Image: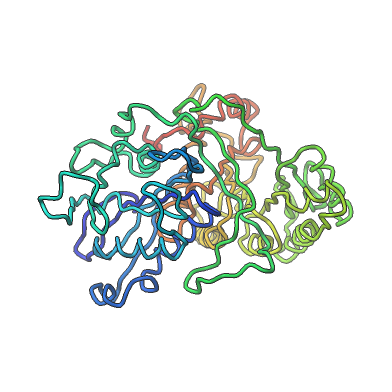
Amino acid sequence: MSALHNINETGMAVAALALGSNVGDRFHNIELALRLLEVPGANLSYEDLQQCNADMYAAVVDTSFLYETSPMYVTDQPSFTNCACLLETNIPPMILLRLLKRIETTVGRVPSIRNGPRAIDLDIVFYGAQVIDTRSPSERNSLENLTGQLVVPHPRISEREFVLRPLNDMIPDFVHPILKESISNLFDALPEKDPSLRRVIPFPRYPLPTDYAWAYPDVPVVPPTLTYWSYPITGNEAPLYPTQRKTHLMSTLNATPDSFSDGAIHNTLETAMSFARESIDAGASIIDIGGYSTRPGAAFVSREEETNRIVPIVKAIRDVDASSSDLDGQLKEVLISIDTFRWEVARASILAGANCINDVYAFTGREDAWPLVDADAIQRSEECMAGMKSVAREFAVPVILMHSRGDAGKNKDYGKYGSGPGVVIRGVQIELGAKVECIIKGRGSVRRWMVIVDPGIGFSKTVEGNLEVLRDGASIVADVQVDGSS
């Protein structure tokens, strides 16, 4: 469910929450808070539990992008990481507020100056389309008396880009029940926008440090952050800041005998490690390791064989003696992505030390036919989607989702999307966009900020189509409908 609604006949509502952090491991704090939200029974007081239904429920069903923002109001403090989520729940509003406060304490928020540094900040921005103010009528002329009270919609939403921008990612058409303006209109009406604001993608550290203690038995372990990438906001807008940005280079290491680029060259541990060191020395930010060739006609590889090709290399990189040289120090900490469409391989690789999943089939599995019409193929695709989403969500890793249409050498006709320039771009937007929607929305979905899209150059496109994607690749992430209607 991606739109807000009021309480329905089952007692369920969708609330919009804002999250922020600027103390400690910001990304860890936000992910931990999101996971704690989904186990409300472990975080509410006995009195609050008695007031809730026996089938009390809360599920994060959508998230925004993640943003690094300058502090507002009190500016002498570190930058914030901000985002928003939609929470499907039957918890009454005031009890939900108390749940958020308890989670803040659990994550590590301590008393501070107003609008000062905090490990986590959780706010109810909307609760469906309800208007709620628990203060007495005589106290409603001020915003200085909100402690312990609930005012919904959040009274300062119209002045806060760090709230409106994430909401605009998820619910641009939702109409503010008091101001009678859509979120997109409120966002556009901001008098000025933060010129330093950028989107961020965090990469977790794996394997977990041996001394990493986990004190939250009710939720899966949230990994510490290894590093993060920041990037300007593109698509329908020009970048919001003019400063230089880093281009991250990905090195491709295929531990296969038949890949089109380096098959049978790096498929031993010795040659793979040599190539990994060469990649670091050449400036690579991330090494992508694959164990199953995607070229047309490639031989079938079992899950076990694919795992056995990849995992030893990942482990060898993580086991490097960082003190032996500066190069090996960098190698030990380098980001590793795993090129696989199998959740079992992804899981084993992450546990060994990978930080990212790179799936050329965007979680829908390797099927030569396109589009899928065979019932068995559709079922396999759905099982693959469920498995990959589960692994990505459990381990909080970024995912690279590529556009493809089965066999890479076939299915190059995009005529259903029109004719002339832009037709291939339009097809990629719609087809890949539909997969991304399935992955980031609904219960058990992947965080929106964890998704990196790949237009699939060289996969099911003519030479002219590939050139079109190269020329206008930035438009892939423009805001468009994904149902093909416009």
Residue 395 at x, y percent in the picture: 57, 61
Q: Between 178 and 191, which is closer to the camera in this rendering?
A: 191
Q: Specify the color scheme.
A: rainbow
Q: Nearer the viewer, residue 479 or 229?
A: 229
Instruction: Give the residue drawn at x 44%, y 31%.
Output: 194
From the image, which quarter does the C terminus lie in?
A: top left
In this picture, is 186 found above or below 341? Answer: above
Quadrant of the image for the N terminus? bottom left
The structure residue drawn at horizontal position 64% and vertical position 35%, both measured from the top left corner, is 457
Residue 214 spot, x, y in % from top left: 56, 70
Residue placed furthest toward the front: 113
Left or right: residue 333 compared with residue 128: right
Residue 324 or 148: which is nearer the viewer?
A: 148
Residue found at the far top of this picture: 420
| Residue pictured at 19% horizontal, 63% vertical | 9
- Give the side of residue 274 with respect to residue 181, left or right: right
Q: Is 178 drawn above or below residue 271 in the view shown?
A: above
Q: Count the numbered circles shown.
A: 0
Residue 331 % position (x, y): 78, 50
